[in-house]
Image (tube, rainbow, N blue to C red):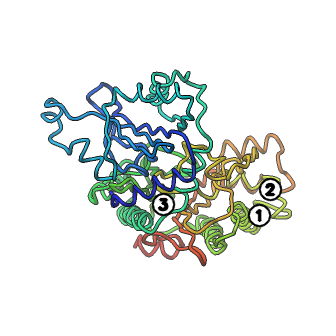
Amino acid sequence: MFSKETYIERRAQLKKSVGSGVLLFLGNEEQGLNYASNNFRYRQDSTFLYYFGLPYAGLAAIIDIDNDEEIIFGDELTIDDIVWMGIQPTLKEKSERVGISKNLPSKELGQYLLQVKKQSRHLHYLPSYRPEHQIKLYNLLQVIPGQEAPSLKFIRSIINQRNHKTEEEIKEIEKACNVTADMHMAAMKNIRPGMYEYEIAAIIEHVAKSNGYELSFPTIATINGQTLHNNTYSNQAKEGDLFLIDAGAETTMGYAGDMSSTFPVSKTFTPKQRDVIRIQNEMHFQAVAALKPGAHYEEVYNLSAKVMVDGMKELGIMKGDSMDAVHEGAHAILYPHGLGHMMGLDVHDMENFGEKWVGYDGREKSTQFGRKSLRLSRLLEPGFVFTIEPGIYFIPELIDLWQKENKFTDFINYDKLQEYRDFGGIRNEEDYLITSEGARRLGKKIPITVEEVEAIRE
């Protein structure tokens, strides 16, 4: 946890931003995997962590702006709890650690909220992303699941605050990024032909666990990099395959790292792999060079896509005006996702509030294939932390579909493209902070270029 003063200041800033009313925070509960006492790994709600810092199940909180009152609702451990889990600080002790002196039992939350409603006061609550939250909102406020009306002012106030990372947050994120880099390096150094994907995934998780960290999201470790979110590990890696990893560590305080790497299962890349990864590298480097305060992230994305089209024209796969291809969406045949996303207490920071508000500052998202997957499209500001992760993917099903539909024939040479249909996919990803003057990579550097990767594969 950060200092008590950090959480007091965060709540004070939130109260000033929202202005009036009562703010409701629902913490997360334990969730059974296949029965009640065999649980998934517990993870506290990130917004609750941000303002109250307590990583314990069974808590809720209220901030009454009008009456300047802050309350944490929860229950003390019973002797059965202590026998099962061991002794823990009391609820009072937990609350005092984050600057809150008032506690009430969980059962009194409903009565408290009923009084707020009777007084016709404005009650602000957040979008639900778990069924348990929907059930709680129904039981507490009679809000029918699927008909919630979360407070937009509450949402936007939180986003505006959490989007700008403080120095102590940046230090915590950098811890996650350093371990994340170690995870990737261990996989690169240890992979050999004949190993299964699950063996590489185990190496990655071992590094996280040996540092006392968890995974910030389910690891992608695959020879089928053309499948963007491949979480199966059943394939055997062989000579000539490309291996793609997307993995990140999460610190004990809940802050995330997120990096991707692509490397050969063999000691070296094939000539065709070298050609494509050098194009991807140039996409990455030009995108990073364009990062600065006031730059528009979507323009950085457009730049990375243009660089990709330029490179594919040299290989004979694409043709025509490169920027026209990007604006019309032809580039998405090989680049069907965005350039990156915000990162912090969530690996996709605050995605539960909606990309329209977090990544687009209220603007509507594009519906164009590929571009609609751009999670971030706004002016960059100091304190923003996000990923840069351009990729190139040869997806046979997509190639065949677009060719059958005669789609973008002014820009795509399908005969040449078919020669690459079994290539797979390439993605490299780093995490960046916008500073007052430009941008800074967070965490250790992982190998990206052909030369860097082949050096570590020796």
**Residue 241: in sight, yes or no?**
no
Secondary structure under the numbered disc 3 in the rendered image: strand
**Residue 287: in sight, yes or no?**
yes
Whichever of callouts 1 and 3 sits on the residue coming sooner in the sequence is 3
Q: For this rendering, which residue is in front, 34 or 62?
A: 62
Side of 308 where 135 appears, left or right: left
Tell me residue 131's x, y (percent).
47, 28
**At label 3, which amino acid type do we have?**
Met
At 83% across and 57% down in the image, what residue appears?
411
The residue mark sitting in front, 3 or 2, is 3
* C-alpha gap between disc 1 and disc 2: 7 Å
Q: Which residue is mark 2?
A: 413
> How many neighbours does mark 3 have within 10 angstroms: few (below 14), some (14-19), or many (20 or more)?
many
Q: For this rendering, which residue is in front, 362 or 420?
A: 362
Secondary structure under the numbered disc 2 in the rendered image: loop
At 15% across and 40% down in the image, what residue appears?
86
Side of 310 where 263 appears, left or right: left
Q: Which residue is mark 1?
A: 316
> How many neighbours does mark 2 have within 10 angstroms: few (below 14), some (14-19), or many (20 or more)?
some
Whichever of callouts 1 and 2 sits on the residue coming sooner in the sequence is 1
Q: Which residue is mark 3?
A: 259
Tell me residue 392's x, y (percent).
63, 58
* C-alpha gap between disc 1 and disc 3: 30 Å
Q: Is there CB contact under 8 Å for labels 1 and 2?
A: yes
Q: Quadrant of residue 419?
A: bottom right
Quarter of the image that includes the N terminus: bottom left
**At label 1, which amino acid type do we have?**
Gly
Whichever of callouts 3 and 2 sits on the residue coming sooner in the sequence is 3
Q: For this rendering, which residue is in front, 228 or 243?
A: 228
Q: Is there CB contact under 8 Å for labels 3 and 2?
A: no
